[in-house]
């Protein structure tokens, strides 16, 4: 019981507070300034549409799957729109435009959660930090293997997602609304590198504000053992809408020096 309470406390504090920053949607806002974009060795191309969140409003199919190819192995998630329509739509648009490609699993607490959804590109994180969606009613419980958006308070979901690694049903009453579940490869998810532990201010793991400010370069330099997402790809259901054609990727713009 003490272990559960400690983990729950860390989870809530990690979502609602960070040193010298404020949080939106379960992620920490990046400072006003940011470093240059990741180098080409880190996959320095991105879908330019990601810089304009307001344009990504496609309605998701009633059910769809996403294949995650990661540095640890592959897993597949199934999203059911009726569980949490707004969350399912947001996740669909993010995957469709390759938001998660290159992103790291920056918060892995065995038996509790795996958290991801901060972009590899600082300018993308900055674009999405205020692109909030309203809460969905909680229709499913936060059981092992279920996916849920992180939040920093009411109606603040943006891009961060966590996968429950245990029975976290106590999160249900806090408004965390699952929108999908791991269909295949939960064993891969449970093997993601967890050695760095909780981030600041509770621990010495990755800081969300610095991920937002520096992107993948910060994690590769300071936390090189973290596992990451190579690609997250939509599996279109039979009879469902095909993904929108993706424009030729543009090189990620670097911040101009002042």
Image (spheres, rainbow, N blue to C red):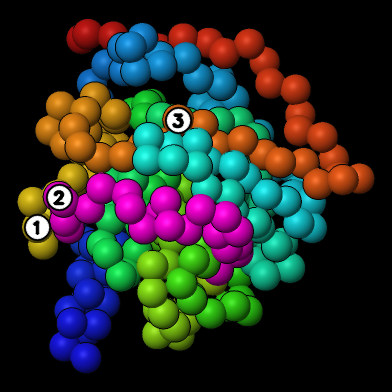
* Precedes in sequence: disc 2 or disc 3: 2
Q: Which residue is identified by label 1?
A: 203
Q: Quadrant of residue 169?
A: bottom left
Q: Tell me: 19 left or right of 139.
A: left
Q: Are marks 2 and 1 in contact (CB under 8 Å)?
A: yes
Quarter in which the N terminus is drawn: bottom left
User: Residue 225: percent from the left, percent from the top?
Assistant: 20, 37
* Sequence-first disc among 2 and 1: 2
> Which portion, as a residue range, is magenta?
178-199
Is 49 left, or right, of 100 in this rendering?
Answer: right
Viewer-side residue, 130 vs 12: 12
Residue 196 is marked as 2
Tag nearer the camera, 3 or 1: 3
Asked if residue 72 lies left or right of residue 258, the reply is right
Report the mark closest to the observer, 2 or 1: 2
Mark nearer the N terminus (3 vs 1) = 1
Residue at left 63%, top 11%? Answer: 248
Q: Give the tally of numbered discs.
A: 3
Mark 2 → mark 1, Cα distance in angstroms:
8 Å
The kind of secondary structure element at disc 3 is strand
- Residue 246 is situated, as x and y percent measured from the top left of the image, at 68, 21
Residue assigned mark 3: 230
Q: Is residue 102 visible?
A: yes
Does the magenta-highlighted stretch encompass residue 186? yes
Residue pictured at 24% horizontal, 82% vertical: 4
């Amino acid at each position: 019981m003490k272990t559960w309470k400690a983990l729950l406390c860390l989870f809530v504090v990690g979502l609602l507070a960070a040193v010298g920053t404020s949080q939106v949607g379960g992620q920490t806002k990046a400072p006003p300034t940011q470093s240059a974009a990741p180098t080409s060795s880190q996959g320095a191309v991105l879908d330019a549409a990601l810089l304009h969140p307001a344009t990504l409003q496609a309605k998701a199919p009633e059910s769809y799957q996403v294949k995650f190819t990661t540095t640890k192995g592959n897993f597949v998630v199934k999203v059911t729109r009726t569980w949490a329509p707004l969350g399912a739509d947001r996740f669909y648009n993010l995957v469709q435009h390759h938001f998660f490609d290159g992103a790291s699993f920056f918060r892995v607490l065995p038996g509790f959660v795996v958290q991801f959804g901060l972009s590899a590109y600082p300018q993308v994180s900055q674009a999405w930090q205020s692109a909030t969606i309203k809460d969905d009613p909680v229709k499913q419980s936060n059981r092992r293997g279920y996916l849920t958006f992180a939040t920093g308070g009411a109606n603040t979901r943006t891009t961060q997602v966590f996968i429950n690694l245990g029975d976290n049903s106590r999160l249900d009453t806090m408004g965390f609304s699952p929108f999908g579940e791991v269909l295949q490869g939960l064993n891969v998810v449970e093997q993601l590198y967890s050695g760095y532990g909780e981030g600041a201010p509770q621990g010495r793991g990755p800081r969300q504000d610095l991920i937002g400010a520096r992107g993948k370069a910060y994690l590769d330099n300071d936390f090189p053992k973290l596992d990451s997402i190579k690609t997250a790809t939509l599996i279109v259901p039979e009879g469902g809408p095909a993904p929108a054609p993706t424009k030729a990727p543009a090189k990620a713009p670097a911040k101009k020096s002042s």
